[in-house]
Image (cartoon, rainbow, N blue to C red):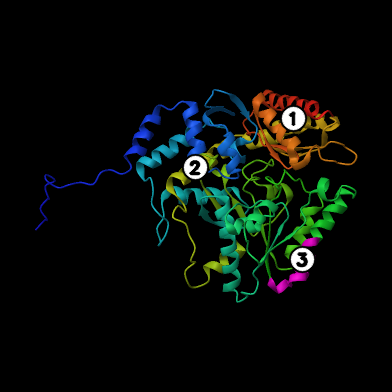
Amino acid sequence: MPTPAIPLQGIATAPYTMRSKRESSNMNMQATTGNLEQLDQSHYLHPFTDFRDYATNGGRIFSRAEHIYIYDSNGHKMLDGMSGLWCCNLGYSQPAIVEAVTEQMHKLPYYNSFFQCANEPAIELAKALVDITEERFNHVFFTNSGSEANDTNLRLVSRYYQVQGRPEKKHIISRNNAYHGSTIAAASLGGMSGMHEQTNGLDYVHHIDQPHWFAVGPDEDPNEFGLRVARQLEEKIDELGEDNVAAFIAEPVQGAGGVIIPPDSYWPEVQRICDERDILLIADEVICGFGRTGQWFGSETYGIKPDLMTFAKAVTNGFQPLGGVMVSDKVADALLSSEGEFTHGLTYSGHPSAAAAGVATLKILRESNIIADAANKLAPHFQGRLQELADHPLVGQVRGRGMFAAVELVKDKASREKLAPESAGAVFCRNTANELGLMVRQTGDAMIMAPPLVSSISEIDSLVDMLVQSIDLTATHYGV
C-alpha cells in the first residue's frame, strides 16, 4: 500500500538560509561589466594566477567569439593568436560540432563507461582515433584532460610491467621545462620549477636537460648539442639502472615551455636509446596533435615511434573537455592478456557529449584539406613573416614549426642578456599586444603563438604586424 502524502499545512518550514546569496545572484543576471569584474575578483580562483594580484587588479572577461576572433565584455576585439589554449585549431565558428553535441545532449547526455558499459559516440571516437594514428595504435583510454591522460600513462606503464613480472621498472624520466599537466602526477612529470617549488612531487620521476639550443647550448653546433642532450637520457638510465627505468616522456615540441624546437639530431637519438634500452616512449601530443606541426601528430613530423601517445585539447577543437591515451599494441597486448581488473578510471571517461564533439571535429579534419593547406600554404607564410623579425634589435631568436612559433626577446643579441628582470620585458610586450588587439602568450622571455589552422594569409599578416608593433613599443619603453 503506498505511503499517503503528508499535508504541508501546519508544518513549520526552515527559512532558506541562502536567500541573500540567491537574491544577489538574481540581481546580477543583468550584471554590467563592472559587476562581473567585481564578482570575478571576489569569487573565482583562476588557474596559474597570482591570486592577490588578481584580487586587486582583475583581468579580462571574454563574452563571445567567432572565426579566429574573441571579444571581451567591453567589446574589445582580439585576433586569437593562441587558438584558445592551443586547442581551437578550427577557430570558434564550427556549427557541426555544436550540432553534434546538442543532438547528443538530447539523446544521451551522460552515462559512465565503468563496469562493462559503453556509449555510441565514445566507441565511434575510439575507432576514428585509431584510423588517423599509426598502425600500432588500436586501443584508446579516454580521460577529461591532458593532465589526467598523463596520470593514466603512469598507471598504464606500471600495470604493463607488473603483468610482465617486472614491477621494479617504475622510474620515469622527463625533461626540464617540460609541461605535462598540473595534477600531482602530471606536474611531477613536467619540469617547470615554479610548479615543483609549490608541490612535493613523485620521487620516482627524474629530469634531464631540454633540447633548447638557445638557452642551454648556444655555443655548440645545434646538431652536436641535440646529440649531447639526447644522450643524457642514456646517462640517466645508467645512473638509475636499466632494470629500474620504465619510460621516457616528452613532447615532440615543448609548447608551454616556450615552443622549443629540437635539433634534427635529437629525436632519432632518443628513439635509438629507448629501443635499445627497453624503455617505453611516451609522446605527449596534447599541444602538437591534430595538425599543429603540419601532420596529424608531432610524432609523425619527427619520425617518433611512441608506445603511448597522450592527446587532448584540439581533439574536440576545445568545444568539450576530453583527453586520452593512444595505447600501442605492444602495451595493449600485455594488458589484454592479463587477468584482473585495471583499477583506474574517471567518472567522465568517454563522456558521450564530449565524444560527440570529438567525432565531429575529426570528421571536419578528415573531410577537408585544413591540415594539408595549413602545412603547405599557411605555415610557410607564417614562419617566413616571423623570420623577418630576426634582425630586430630586441629579437634573440625566432623559432617555429608548422603553426606555432616563439620570438625570444633580449636586450643584447651577442650576450643574450635578458631585456628585464623576471621576464618583465616579455610581459610588457604581451600586454601591449593584447591592447593592440592580438592575443599572444609570454613564456619566460619569449612571445609564443599558435594561431588557428583556419586563419587566412591576410590574418596571419595582421598577427605579425601587431606583434612587430608590440615589439617596437617594447623597445621604445626599454630604450633599446
Q: CA distance from mark 2 to mark 1?
A: 31 Å
Q: Nearer the viewer, mark 1 or mark 3?
A: 3
Does residue 327 appear in the picture of this structure?
no
Q: Quadrant of residue 410?
A: top right
The chief SS type of the magenta part is helix
- Amino acid marked by disc 1: His
Rendered residue at 63%/34% (across/down): 453
Q: Residues within 10 Å of mark 1 (few under 14, many from 20)?
A: some
Tag 2 near tag 3, CB within 8 Å: no
Name which of mark 2 and mark 1 comes first in the sequence. 2
Q: Quadrant of the N terminus?
A: bottom left
Which residue bears the numbered disc 2?
Answer: 320
For mark 2, give the secondary structure. Answer: loop
Q: Position of residue 214 (x, y in %)?
A: 83, 45
Which residue bears the numbered disc 3?
Answer: 236
Name the residue nearer the viewer: 198 or 205: 198
Q: Residue 430 in magenta?
A: no
Q: Position of residue 363 (x, y in %)?
A: 53, 40
Q: Quadrant of residue 47?
A: top right
Q: CA distance from mark 1 to mark 3?
A: 40 Å
Name which of mark 2 and mark 3 comes first in the sequence. 3
Q: Which residues are magenta?
A: 232-244
Q: Is residue 252 left or right of residue 115?
A: right
Which residue bears the numbered disc 1?
Answer: 381
Q: Nearer the viewer, mark 2 or mark 3?
A: 3
Q: Is residue 463 above or below residue 100?
A: above
Name the residue nearer the viewer: 167 or 357: 167
Q: Quadrant of residue 68?
A: top right
